[in-house]
Each structure stands twice: as C-alpha cells, then as structure tokens.
Image: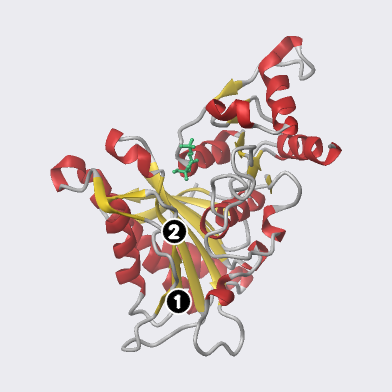
Amino acid sequence: MKRISLTQHLIEEQRLHNTIPSELRLLIEVVSRACKTISHSVSKGALGDVLGAASTENVQGEIQKKLDIISNEILLQANEWGGHLAAMASEEMESFHPIPNRYPKGEYLLLFDPLDGSSNIDVNVTIGTIFSVLKAPEGMQEPSEQDFLQVGTKQVAAGYAVYGPQTMLVLTTGNGVNCFTLDREMGSWVMTQRDIKIPADTAEYAINASNARHWFPPVRRYIDELEQGKVGPRGKNFNMRWIASMVADVHRILNRGGIFMYPADARDPDKPGKLRLMYEANPMSLIIEQAGGAATDGQQRILDIQPTGLHQRVAVFLGSKNEVERVTGYHQAT
Ligand code: P6P
C-alpha cells in the first residue's frame, strides 16, 4: 500500500468527497498532534512522574489519574487557540469548555475522553484517546451544553489514538475508516491500513464476565449460547477477551472481528451501562459502522440516540454485524 501522511490523506479526501474543509483538516491535525504529545507522556511512565492517582475525582466520581489530567490539559491547550472550535467537552470536566475570548472561535465542537482505560495506566496495559467532532448549530452565538446534544449521525469526524506496542490513529470523516501508525523518527502519522472492514461474523467476544449475576435475560441467553460452544446452539466454540480498555478492545475488533458488550444490568436502573454516549459510544459507533460493523444499545442504533446530557451513559453492543444483530434481536424478543 502506498504510504501517505495524514495531511496528504486529508487533502486527498477533501478533493474526492469535499467533506473536509480546511478548518476541519486543521482540527484533525491539531488533535492528532496532541495525541502524539499524550503518547510521549504516557510512554515515560515512572520516569516522567506521571503515574498514580491525582488527588481529585472527575464528574463520574472516579479518582482521576495524573495522566487523565495531563492528557486533558494537552487537548485543551492544543485546541483552544486555533480558531477552529466553538467549544470542547471532556469526560474529565463537568461542564463544557468555551474557547477563551482572547482567541477566535470556529464552527466545530470537539468532545473527547482524553485517556480511556485509565485503570490500565499504572500496569502498562494499552490505553487510548477517543474524540468526536460535531458542527456547532447554525447561528449559534454563545455555546451551551444543549448545542453538544446532537445525535451520533451528526458527527463529521470521529477517531481514537491507541497507545499500545505501536501508537496508532484511527479516523473516519464519513467515507470509511483509515489507520495511521506514528513514525516516531519523523514524528508523522503514516497510513498503514486503508478503508478497514470488520468481518460480519466472529468467534470472539468481549464482556466483563464478573458482572454475570447482574445481567438481564437477553445478555444471559446470548453469553450462555457462546459458552456452550460447539455442542450448543451456535455450533462453534468462542474465545473471550476483556482488556478493560475500550480503545484496545475496539481496535482488536476493527482488525479481526468480534463483539464488545457493556450492557445495562440490574445493579442501577438509572445507570444503563458504564460507557458514556457522547465521547465514547458515539465516536466508536461511527467508526464501527463506517467499517461495516453495527452498534446498538440493545434496542436501537447508538447513532440514533437523542442525547439528554453531556455525560449520559448508554449500554453498548458493537462489532461484527451478525453478532450485534443477534444479541439485539434477543433484547427485542423479550
Ligand atoms: P470495567 C475504562 O474505564 C472503561 O471506560 C472502558 O475503556 C472499558 O471498556 C470499561 O471502562 C471497563 O470497565 O467495569 O471492566 O472496569
């Protein structure tokens, strides 16, 4: 495959599809540069005094890791001066972050989970950054939280950086999914996979099985059938993976198929699952669908959910199309 840079890809996409105006190209390049900086900080580990917990909690009530805060700051500082954004929102901040008056404002809204999978940081397991881009509503003057609450199909771009054995950037702007590997010597993102597609079938599933006693019947039925393997109704054996880092699990599924599940369960009816709609489920669902996969909350397409809050949670079933449709069908059969 011809190795091209992220910049060349974005310019060629604009020529082909006219979907990446210069402000959006700037936004994507600024975010990708911030992810390089985050990758550099993450890779220092103990040598950079960046491990361990900070003394604060985020809006989710979770103890923040030092790298959560560092990564959030990197994204805020990288993006606030460029004139491409009207505002930003982050898992690590209760309310959205308007662009300071000293800088020009643009027409895009950027949402992100600056460092997803933080429980893995201190044990050197793959983590990542997830981002979602929306257009600010026409005629918006001063941004409000309401301006962010747009259905997932309105995203004009979505992506993630995965900080693993390689640092990679996975991006969609609505015409397929492309993957870039960070060339650390040159400091540039180089396209290494073009228009990646997820197999419709799989023999691999991802779920936190320690929650099994809390699952509702459709999930219980679906997992039981997988566990019965060859002798059960599925007629084949399945494998399980759970990295407890959504970016890592999704990246594996994007590359070799699979189904990722974080269902709602009986523990807390007000908390439909653990993952957040706006900056985890929506961007990942757009990427998965653009790669030929499917993503639902067990009842409906995630990208069709009308958001009601910046940090609202949603149940997630995403990955190989035929498996997602099956488990969603079990929910609809009840
Ligand atoms: P559990 C990480 O905290 C995260 O938000 C996702 O990246 C990951 O898939 C999930 O939570 C892991 O949750 O309950 O297995 O620790």
**Quarter-of-image position of residue 125:** top left
Q: Nearer the viewer, residue 256 or 275?
A: 275
Dot 2: element: loop
Q: Residue at x 69, y 64 (%)?
A: 306
Residue 314 visible in the picture: yes
Q: Residue at x 48, y 65 (%)?
A: 111
Above or below 256: residue 187: below
Left/right of residue 332 with respect to residue 79 in the rendered view: right
Instruction: Please provide percent x and percent y for residue 317.
Output: 65, 41
What is the three-letter code of the residue carrying label 2? Glu
Q: Residue at x 60, y 70 (%)?
A: 149
Left/right of residue 259 with respect to residue 310 in the rendered view: right
Above or below 220: residue 149: below
Mark 2: give few (<14), some (14-19) or many (20+) Cα within 10 Å.
many
Tag nearer the camera, 2 or 1 = 2
Disc 1: which residue: 87
Left/right of residue 21 with respect to residue 302 in the rendered view: left
What is the three-letter code of the residue carrying label 1? Ala
Instruction: Please provide percent x and percent y for residue 63.
Output: 34, 48
Q: Nearer the viewer, residue 24 or 76?
A: 76
C-alpha separation, residue under disc 2 versus residue under disc 1:
14 Å
Instruction: Please provide percent x and percent y for residue 97.
Output: 40, 74
Q: Residue at x 38, y 88 (%)?
A: 104
Instruction: Please provide percent x and percent y for residue 176.
Output: 62, 55
Q: What label does residue 42 carry, if any? A: none
Disc 2: which residue: 91
